[in-house]
Amino acid sequence: MSLAVPGDPRLSARFQPPPALHRGDRVAVVAPASGFDRASFDAGLTLIGERYRPSHGPGLFERHRYLAGDDARRLAELTAALADPQVRGLFCARGGYGATRLLRHLAAQPPPGPPKPLVGFSDITALHLWLQAHGRVSIHGPVLTQLPRLAEATRLRLFDLLESDAPAPALRGSDCYVGGVAEGPLLGGNLSVLSRVLATRCMPDLEGAVLLLEDQGERPYRLDRMWTHLELAGVFARVRGIVLGTFTACEEPGAAYSSTEVLRELAQATGLPCAAGFPIGHGTVNEPVPLGVRVRLDADAVSLTFLESATA
């Protein structure tokens, strides 16, 4: 068993939480990545509309190949929503691919406007990393098209996280890969996207962090390749612990090994406290979690405790 040095509160002090949302607040719906299914979108819009006042521009439904409109449209929509003082939070319509393309334009500038929560996951990890590189807290949580497929308890967790000044309830995983305890700001998200943002100006400082990783549709050798990239880049020498969410559809057809075996072996090689099977990611459950807040990972107890609130 390994034991990481307890987290220094100063590590998370560099991240600024946004103000809490209230019922009836105006929120923006943005599509910074792929196009999306309209029926799922409308169902998700109805759900957040029961609590807030969502708005979006007419360009939201545009398509450019596999993207929700060209880069200029998506960038303008995102930056306008961040800068608008009447908008209190942002919900992403879908992940997929495309947010990473915006980083070439965002890298040279801080987020416009005051801190406000941005909710999304998967490809939206690119925007989370950019926000954390500028000291902002954001929400790794369901996109609008996923929200209707999730349990009501998960939706309520998201709303409570956005509206409460109390830390989010703890989460439990299913497996301990390396025992030990680690504290630090929770950073990361989708493994594939994070590996692409490494060594760019949009990558936050991972020193002392607890690293969250999840993914979908990546075969074991690809997971190994991306993990090895993180290792060669010195990531595991800087973080204090590893939280693994769901890795769905990541099996090699007909193979005598599983993605779980590969990830366990890779995690054990780091020697860092690591627990797996947390309900975060592309699975049937995607519990929202704040990024940039200080957490305590107890890998032996397979628990993740949130020590700070997501909003001020």
Image (tube, rainbow, N blue to C red):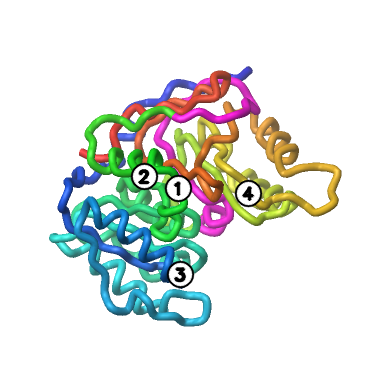
Q: Are marks 2 and 3 in contact (CB under 8 Å)?
A: no
Q: Which residues are magenta?
A: 171-197
Residue 62 in percent (x, y) is at 39, 80
Residue annotated with mark 2 = 155
Instruction: Decide if residue 203 is in sight here.
Output: yes
- Between marks 1 and 3 in the image, the one whose residue lies nearer the viewer: 1
Q: Secondary structure at mark 2?
A: helix
Q: Could you give the CA–CA distance between mark 1 and mark 2, rounded to whole angstroms?
A: 7 Å
Residue annotated with mark 3 = 36
- Badge 2 amino acid: Arg
Q: Are marks 1 and 2 in contact (CB under 8 Å)?
A: yes
Q: Is residue 240 above or below residue 221?
A: above
The mark that comes first in sequence, 1 or 4, is 1
- In depth, the one of 9 and 243 nearer the eye is 243
Task: Give the total number of marks visible in the rendering.
Answer: 4
For mark 4, does the 10 Å Cα neighbourhood hold few (<14), some (14 to 19), or many (20 or more) residues? some
Q: Could you give the CA–CA distance between mark 2 and mark 4, rounded to whole angstroms?
A: 21 Å
- Badge 4 amino acid: Thr
Q: Secondary structure at mark 1?
A: loop
Q: Could you give the CA–CA distance between mark 1 and mark 4, rounded to whole angstroms?
A: 16 Å
Q: Is residue 152 left or right of residue 84?
A: right
